Amino acid sequence: MKKKIIAGIAAGIMLASSTVGLVGLPNPFTGNLQAAAATKQQLKPFGKYKKTITYTIGKSTPGIPKLPKGSTYEKNAYTKYLKQLLNIQNKDSFEAETGDSYNQKVSMAVASSDLPDIMSVDLNTLRELVANNEIQDLSSVYKSSTTPYIKAMYNSYHGRALKEATFNGKLMAMPSTQNANVPTMLWIRQDWLDKLGLKAPKTVDQLQQVLQAFVQRDPGNNGKGNTIGLALSKSVGGEYGGLFVADSLFSIYNSYPRQWIKQNGKVVYGSTTNQTKQGLAKLASWYQKGLIDPQMAVRDSIESLIISGKAGAFFGPWWSGDYPINSALQKDPKADWKPYIISKTGNGKISAYTQDPDSEFYVVKKGYAHPEILPKIVSALSDRLVRKDKNYKPVVDFVQGGYDGGKPINVLVNFDNATAQMYKNLQATVDGKKDPKTLTLDDTTSYNAIKTYLKDPKNAPVNAKSSYWSRMLGAKLMATTKVKNVDSLYFGQTKSMQLKWSNLQKLEDEAFLQIVTGQKPVSYFKTFVRQWHQQGGTQITKEVSQAVK
Amino acid sequence: MIRSKSFGSRLSYIIIWLLLLAMTALCFVPMMNMVSISFSNSSAASANQVGLLPVHFNLNSYSLLLEDGQFWRSFLISIERVVIGTSLNLILSVLMAYPLSKTTKQFAARNIYMNILIFTMLFSGGMIPLFLVVKGLGLMNTIWALILPGAVPIFDVILLMNFFKSVPESLEEAAMMDGASKLTILFKIYLPISVPALATIGLFAIVGHWNDYFSGLLYMNNPANYPLQTYIQQLNVDMTKITDPSQLKALASVSDKTLNAAKIVVSILPVLAVYPFLQKYFTTGLIIGSVKG
């Protein structure tokens, strides 16, 4: 009861303060440059401004500047396009590498209350900014200045995409979406299978036999005892669409490690379920039989196993052809990796958990006079530029030159089924049912590689080969496999999580690793679950159940 | 020293030698590995097949490195930082340590200054207040943001102060009798005899400035202004944490193991070059300063 009252008061305060914000206390710092709010014409997605509008951004960049000579993040093909189309120009308050460096810059900007007009933040920072009333409500400009195509992409997540950015019915940010990238598949050395006269595995037991044959009969001539059956990451499972994690194995047991899921009507943490215990037990038995990399606990470069030709199988997403298999092919052109789906009965039907539909959130500083600029940029870059204006020469040259990081604001919006759709488009084009000219710019690049591969599959250059494997084998499997989606329910941080989550994660990591590598018996799982609940898990589960209600 | 020839002492020599050799190897092997990787074929490097000797020796990564403008820009920024920063550290340390080495009779406010110094050594404001000060002073994006916040290395001041204290008072009195001013005494008497101590704190400062990556990250809003170690820190990427294919392209550009190894090798050369010249002072300087006069 008490909690509800407090929540009510907090909501009231937030509501009141945001209304005050809407009425518009003039901000002394930005007021002088952009005096008048946008006209109706300017609120249209592609409405051009008469005078150049300058906006400041926090720019997250690729590690090393990969721009054409003479270009900068403020002046390149993309900023030129935006200038021509909308008459807007970015000015970078700060530039830093995506990840820790960029996050560091954002937290400094927040701490010193000196936000750029537009920047991307993570979910926790978004909540903090909303609570401190430092960013604008975008509900109305989202309606007026976003194209129907962009809205359709957001809506393809059935409301999940914008939900995280919505507070008390107000849209406070435009998120970058993360489209479906599951199921991850089993990539296996086809040439090894052929050499040993084995069939591709379809079930867990068949996979076990194949791994056993790999390890015992050494088809790769690595020398006795040097062949590794399955390469596995030390986090074992629970990284959505990740490389080297055994999520597709766990899902066979209906286990979804590290996810908040609903089980028998109750919210539970996937790592603590009995199903996860079964998955771990299977992996532990494989480890004991020597089918899994014996050094998995200390291995820091798992890809080196794939590249050097020591490992015979790994779990990976559809794009594994691009990495690490691409590097493996450069080392040994005969390494023939093929993707397969492992299922319970071998009928190819599987389940997989869904991921956080949003990866980052673009926010507009309170007091900035042109909040509509954000949806307009998204509409320009993710709709018009990839469809109507896809032959815009400077950008085409930019992309084909292998350059990267030009977009001032990189809101990635995509349909939830974008990968499957990509495969379907490419397949249709290869079959001659679709005009190559109608492909998007990225797909055109892939299509050219696929064409090169199909001309002479045996002697195709490495990049064409790996592109074909990713898109025509991996993505095909993704598009055609029947997947039962299990919704992962919660991605934020509850109050108790802030204090206790990192400890619980450590406990979980260690328990997983110890059980798989046999340092602790499978029965230790029970102890782990008890400890997990004692050290805050029970309370956090309660809070998460509350939050997802 | 007289060496006893007993079995026990010989054995202990052998053990000590072996231990030292093992420790040398511990330090040397990773460096050698890095050097070998930088000279190797890149697919051998990504397959983890390079040990102590290069596989398929070639100079590709070094010729690529020569064309990398940002690397050399960052390299120059780091050199600039070391030169300006270290000189400033030394000048300020000397100017501070000399008066503080006097007694309260000669310098009444000495203890007040001393307490202020020690207080700041023990308690710092933390990252965010420091950031706000640097920002408020308009130092962001300038080389001074890397130099001024640490311009007075208090540990070095105390080290030098103790060294000055150990200088016999009669030396200063004699100079005074000959009509030398305080400044002349500092520069003509104290400095020449404190070269070991200065070399020690100079080396501390050079290594500290050269290796610091975090302040570059914090105070530079534009990667073009990064010092070398900040630049190198950006190369460290965990490829298994990728969850989205769109990140792949960006990461492929930094995943070149041999090129990164070449960058690291070149980045340690300057410190490696300075070390032999200053090392002989290093131990003596530390010991001398620590004896309180």
Image: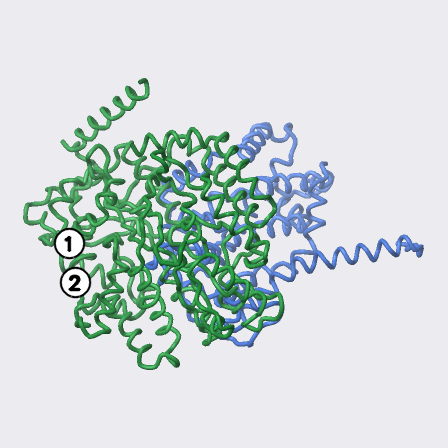
Chain colours: A green, B blue
The x and y percentages for residue A369 are: 16, 42
Q: Is residue A149 above or below residue B125?
A: below
Residue A42 versus residue A431: which sits nearer the camera?
A431
Q: Is residue B144 above or below residue A70?
A: above
Residue A340 versus residue A129: which sits nearer the camera?
A340
* Residue hosting label 2: A387
Q: Is residue A131 above or below residue A348?
A: above
Mark 2 lies on a secondary structure that is: loop
Residue A246 versus residue B29: which sits nearer the camera?
A246
The residue depicted at 72 percent of the width and 44 percent of the height is B288
* Residue hosting label 1: A149
Mark 1: few, some, or many residues within 10 Å (few <14, many ≥20)? some
Q: Amino acid at mark 2?
A: Arg
Tell me whether the residue at label 2 lies in contact with that at label 1, contact meaning CB atoms closer than 8 angstroms. yes
A324 left or right of B1 in image: left
Name the image quarter holding the C terminus of chain B.
Answer: top right
Mark 2: few, some, or many residues within 10 Å (few <14, many ≥20)? some
Subunit under mark 2? A
Q: Residue furthest top?
A: A2
The x and y percentages for residue B12 are: 85, 53
A444 left or right of A219 in image: left
